[in-house]
Image (tube, rainbow, N blue to C red):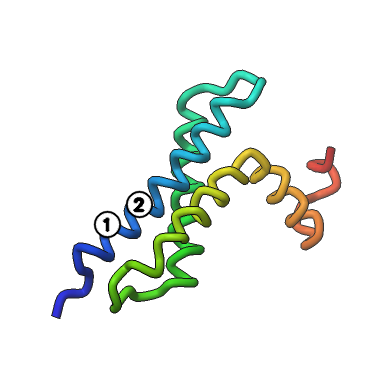
Amino acid sequence: MVWLNVDEALFYSLIWTMGFLSSIFVTLGSADDKPTRKCLFVGAISGFLAFSIVSIFVGRVAQPLSGHWYYLGVASLIGLGSKFQDEILKNFLKKMKLLSQSDKE
């Protein structure tokens, strides 16, 4: 009994890579200058977010992967939303009233 098979590892590594790459391209393509280090950071976060969201929906892959490949598109969409992740986090914290009045812009 192996806890992770090769197909599953390949699938989830592709999910992370798609989230990472789409986030990198969006971040580098924006008009304002961003250092490469921040682009890699945002890409890694988006990759992990894509991995976690897809793994929640897919779970263990016990059957052949023929029906799960459209999740690569889901991972790409998650990466494309990385440009707005700071705004989403700020709005979430404001709604939860965890952001102090001095931090609000």
Residue drawn at x 68%, y 42% as measured from the top left:
84
Q: Secondary structure at mark 2?
A: helix
Q: Secondary structure at mark 1?
A: helix
Evaluate if marks 1 and 2 touch, with contact meaning CB atoms under 8 Å apart: yes
Name the mark on residue 10: 1
Relative to 103, 70 lies left or right: left
Gap in angstroms between the C-alphas marked 1 and 2: 6 Å
Q: In this view, which residue lies farthest toward the front?
A: 66
Q: Is residue 49 visible?
A: no
The percent coordinates of residue 13 (x first, y second) are 32, 53
- Number of numbered markers: 2
Vertical relation: 105 (above or below) 14: above
Nearer to me, 105 or 39 = 39
Q: Quadrant of the C terminus?
A: top right
Residue drawn at x 56%, y 51% as measured from the top left:
78
Nearer to me, 46 or 67 = 67
